[in-house]
Amino acid sequence: MDPSFENVEATALSVFRSQFYEAPQVISSAPGRVNLIGEHTDYNDGPVFPAAINRRIAIAAGPRPDRTIEVYAGNLNTRAKFSLDDLAPTRINSWLNYLRGVTELLHRKGDPACGANLVVYGNVPRGGGLSSSAALEVAYAHTLMTLTNTSHPPMDIARLCQQAEHEWAGVHCGIMDQCISAMGRKDAGLHLDCRSLTYRHVPLPAGARLVICDTGVKRALASSAYNTRRAECRAGVAVLAGVIPDITSLRDVSLDAFLEYQSLLEPTVRRRCRHVITEIARVEQTVKAITADDLALAGKLMYDSHISLQRDYEVSCPELDAVVDICAEVDGVYGARMTGGGFGGSALCLVHAEDVPETVRRLTIEYPQKTGRKPSLIVTGAEDGVSARRI
Ligand code: GLA
């Protein structure tokens, strides 16, 4: 079965009954994401423009009387548990750290503690750069809130999940992935300002589809390389703050000011800053183009973004470049680029609905020829964010 059509909530519910011999009381699910444009801008206080996709992580849950959270991970076929009295990160079953972190942070907000049995089951590819961890965090936060009859504004939940990722998983991510998983909307991208945290849903033109190609490349050191990029951006701000008054992040540096002072920057830092500053401008131009139904311009900006990520930010890889090159040759493709943190993961192609089959055909044939790897393809529109309910 094509996993995009799989109802992960129904699977989680039925697995729950067979694992725990009782009826689940809550079902929640949250989506993975693609970023249409605005890569590595979130932690520089800039804008992003992601969309939720048709792959989700579902959690079926029921309360239990003790202070234990017991989880059956359907995709891993593993069962594990932790105590509400010991929520510090651990090395064993490190995937549970996301849950430990979210649990602890909800308790700190004053939510009541509640033991629970859970089944987690999803079809967001792990390590595919489509934010499976944000989907897990957001779905789990909503599971606990629904079990304990509490609620918090979506932005508070996104920030809490981001904090769990920083402190329990050691990845110093921006706010984009958790926001879109919590606030995605069908047929719209999320134009989010990562400084003010204000946002707007921008409808995507009817007839446009997204083809996502998971390259199958997973680089082990991706999270430390990600943290290095963050540090390089901070180093750039430290130098530029000496000559440009009142700047606290690259968001505050105009292209003109950058061009004037770029010679003060060490070459690597200069290229990193150039990517971020030009990418921030591309987000705003893309949102305008999408609003004006100008998909040709939006597509061109996607290609520009990819080149900037490849040459200046140096987070692409030959496999991601191969996907973009193949897509660029297909009629009906508006644009393509790597999406997410990079160093492997997925590339995204914006294409007219009628030309999806040809795009899929060409990637299926040509990607293995160019790279020796098999692509995993997802065809999606923009979808809704998290949902949770009692049953
Ligand atoms: C990862 C992070 C996001 C963002 C992207 C790059 O997905 O989790 O916060 O920084 O990389 O745009």
Image: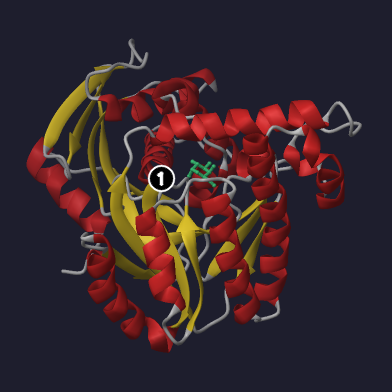
Q: Residue at x 65, y 81 (%)?
A: 293
- Is 211 above or below relative to 151? below
- Is 3 above or below relative to 236? below
- Is 354 above or below relative to 317? below
Q: Position of residue 252 (x, y in %)?
A: 81, 41
Depth check, front residue: 57 or 374: 374
Q: Position of residue 247 (x, y in %)?
A: 83, 33
Residue 274 is left or right of residue 148, and the answer is right
Secondary structure beneath label 1: loop
Q: Residue at x 41, y 39 (%)?
A: 146
In terms of image quadrants, where is residue 84?
top left
In terms of image quadrants, where is residue 117?
top left
Q: Position of residue 220 (x, y in %)?
A: 32, 34
Q: Position of residue 42 (x, y in %)?
A: 62, 43
Q: How is the image coloured?
A: secondary structure
- Is 125 above or below relative to 69? below
For mark 1, what is the residue? 343
Q: Amino acid at mark 1?
A: Phe
Quarter the N terminus occupies: bottom left
In terms of image quadrants, where is residue 156?
top right
Residue 377 is left or right of residue 151, and the answer is left
Depth check, front residue: 22 or 200: 200
Residue 3 is left or right of residue 207, and the answer is left
- Taking the image as drawn, is residue 220 in sight? yes
Q: Residue at x 24, y 36 (%)?
A: 118
- Taking the image as drawn, is residue 125 in sight? no
